[in-house]
Image (cartoon, rainbow, N blue to C red):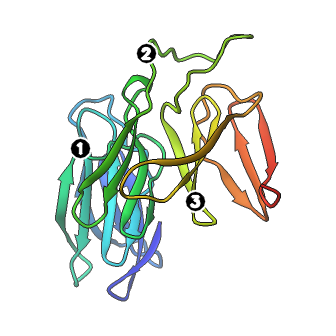
Amino acid sequence: VMATIHGKRHALCVTRQGLLSLDPDTGARHFAYWFRARQDSSVNAMTPVVQEDCVLISSAYFRNGSVLLRVRPDGKSVEEVWRGLQLEMHWSRPVLTDGKLYAFSGRNEPDAQMRCVGWADGRLYWDRFEGWPNAGHSKLRPGEQPPEFYGRGSFILADGKLVALGECGRLGLSELSAEKPVEVGHWQVPGLQYPCWAGPVLAHQRLYLRDESLLICLDWEGK
């Protein structure tokens, strides 16, 4: 992620070891922050979220959780604002709007949670279970019904609403609310199967969704 912080340009990269900031012109290192679970099988896959002088990174592995970092004025170091397990992001990136983070938290399908968390203090505003039991890492068999949950998923913000895509192809639309989840509606997209790990993309009034074998384009303008 490219960002200007305290007047200085940063290329912010999340690696397996943590957060790295580079000068995009020279490649010189501004700072590094170690953020990795001790186990070799740990993964850091979430793209950083940046607002003003703060950077959020997160992992879903081995209770590494999330940390909000503030870049110091010299641009050469960071300090922790908060750290906790309020969000454990696997691959998707939370939506930040009006000081709130909306996200799917959890490493595996059974522990998937939909959450709203405060950006500045890490406060958990609400939490809704979205996992399903007996989850298997395979595509649904012909005729098999998908679970009545999103599982882990991805959010984007469009027209002031949250668009969610669950990992079995459940598409949902929700209002922004820090009080409780307010779902307008949901729909199991025909043909989409586990795993739908690519987030939805909205461009030129077209909503693009995909799994590992199918790409679907929906008319957003006529929603």
How many neighbours does mark 1 have within 10 angstroms: few (below 14), some (14-19), or many (20 or more)? some
Q: Disc 2 marks which residue?
A: 133
- The first of marks 1 and 2 along the sequence is 1
For residue 151, the mark is none
In percent of width and height, residue 11 lies at: 43, 69
Residue at 53%, 45% in the rendered image: 154
Q: In the rendered structure, which amino acid carries the disc numbered 3?
A: Lys
**Nearer to us: label 2 or label 3:** 3
Q: Disc 1 marks which residue?
A: 85
How many neighbours does mark 3 have within 10 angstroms: few (below 14), some (14-19), or many (20 or more)? some
Q: In the rendered structure, which amino acid carries the disc numbered 1?
A: Leu
How many neighbours does mark 2 have within 10 angstroms: few (below 14), some (14-19), or many (20 or more)? few
In percent of width and height, residue 10 lies at: 40, 74
Measure how far apart labels 1 and 2 are at the Cα level: 22 Å
Measure how far apart labels 2 and 3 are at the Cα level: 29 Å
**Nearer to us: label 1 or label 2:** 2
**Nearer to us: label 3 or label 1:** 3
| Helix, strand or loop status at disc 2 | loop
In percent of width and height, residue 149 lies at: 52, 29
Q: Disc 3 marks which residue?
A: 161
Q: Quadrant of the C terminus?
A: bottom right
Q: In the rendered structure, which amino acid carries the disc numbered 2?
A: Pro
Residue at 54%, 46% in the rendered image: 183
Q: Are marks 3 and 1 in contact (CB under 8 Å)?
A: no
| Helix, strand or loop status at disc 1 | loop
